[in-house]
Image: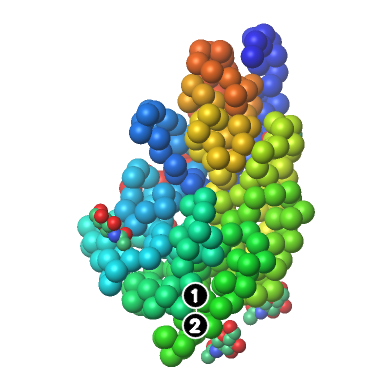
Amino acid sequence: MRRTAQLLLLALGSAIAMASASHKRGLVFVPNEQWPQDSQIWVKPGSDLTWYYNYKPKPDKFEFVPMMWGKVDGTAFLDNVTQVIDGGRNISHVLGFNEPDGAVSGGSNLDPESAAQIWVTNMEPLAKRGVKLGMPAVTGSDRGVKWTQNFARECAKVANKNCTFDFLPIHFYGSFEGLASHMGSMSASFPNVTQWITEYNWDNQDLSTTQSFFNTTCEYFDRLDSVARYSYFGSFRSKVSNVGPDAVMLNNDGELTDIGSWYLGGSATGVNPQSAAGKSGASILAAVTAAGIVGSLLALP
Ligand SMILES: *[C@@H]1O[C@H](CO)[C@@H](O)[C@H](O)[C@H]1NC(C)=O
Ligand SMILES: *[C@@H]1O[C@H](CO)[C@@H](O)[C@H](O)[C@H]1NC(C)=O
Ligand SMILES: *[C@@H]1O[C@H](CO)[C@@H](O)[C@H](O)[C@H]1NC(C)=O
Ligand SMILES: *[C@@H]1O[C@H](CO)[C@@H](O)[C@H](O)[C@H]1NC(C)=O
Ligand SMILES: *[C@@H]1O[C@H](CO)[C@@H](O)[C@H](O)[C@H]1NC(C)=O
């Protein structure tokens, strides 16, 4: 990716005007042991990100939303989160099971009946402490919608009252139209429940399709009052991506791609997601400069 300085400056100038900060923006944090330095990218001054989750009940880095990923014994999740809160950390929201309707690709594979038992034991006590609870995040499918309906019914049986669902996390992989339609189905099942889009992308598309999907969705989520937060998938390098080589925020050298930089409130970097080490030194400078210009929204604990 060779670019002239002049081109970069032009790109920088227009992107500064266009880059828009969003307080809704968060991070699905997928650290990689091989490149621990990549984790620092998300907490640089100027980053747009205000929250994150990591599929676990305990924090890695900055402001944190715990997740009860799957099946737990007894009150193990509740105990873990209580420990984090009692340790002085401000936990205001927690996420429920990760894709319990799925057995593959990271799904936690739980039937609604067992899930309801675990929920009432581990999540409802947190609601009593004022923590807001996110409904389990099912796969973006009709099967997923059905799972949440069964789960809500089972949960009410176990709890002898309707369970607490303060917000509705949504996962979706596919076109913008598909995503919007899925959000509609979820809101038909759970009217008036605020949505968080906690995993989304149009996976395995070419770069320009991916970028235009990215722009359209950010604009849509920012505009809708019913969407409180969103976190783009994924925050990892191209060669370890499970959603296609162009869907990522880092290239193979850990540099921010255009999407990665836009997501943090910066300008285009011109870094091709599939490029390898050392191909785009000038682009890093552009990203860092732009990130410095956009004000810091990060609230580090
Ligand atoms: C609770 O925390 C411990 C220690 O970090 C961990 O091993 C365990 O898996 C956690 N349990 C749950 C249910 O999150
Ligand atoms: C905890 O975080 C929430 C959400 O970010 C915020 O509204 C609240 O004021 C915070 N509370 C404290 C004690 O910092
Ligand atoms: C419980 O939820 C169901 C639908 O999910 C609703 O029809 C019913 O009114 C709710 N009951 C209470 C007591 O809120
Ligand atoms: C729920 O949403 C519908 C559609 O937006 C709206 O008409 C209705 O007033 C809302 N109900 C409540 C209780 O907020
Ligand atoms: C996406 O938005 C950025 C500005 O944030 C703009 O520079 C770029 O041209 C847009 N790309 C597409 C494909 O819409």
Name the residue that disc number 2 marks. 154
Q: What mark, if any, has residue 269 been given in the picture?
A: none
Residue 222's place in the image compared with 5, above or below, is: below
Which amino acid type corresponds to the residue marked 2 in the rendered image?
A: Glu
- In front of the other: 82 or 20: 82
Left or right side of 4 for 95? left
Q: Work out whether mark 1 precedes mark 2 in sequence or the reverse, and give the earlier one.
A: 1
Quadrant in the picture for residue 73 = bottom left
CB under 8 Å between discs 1 and 2: yes
Residue depicted at 61% across the width and 49% down the height: 200
Residue 38's place in the image compared with 72, above or below, is: above
Residue depicted at 45% across the width and 49% down the height: 52
Seen as rendered, the residue at the extreme front is: 103
Q: Quadrant of the N terminus?
A: top right
Total number of numbered labels?
2
Residue 241 spot, x, y in % from top left: 54, 36
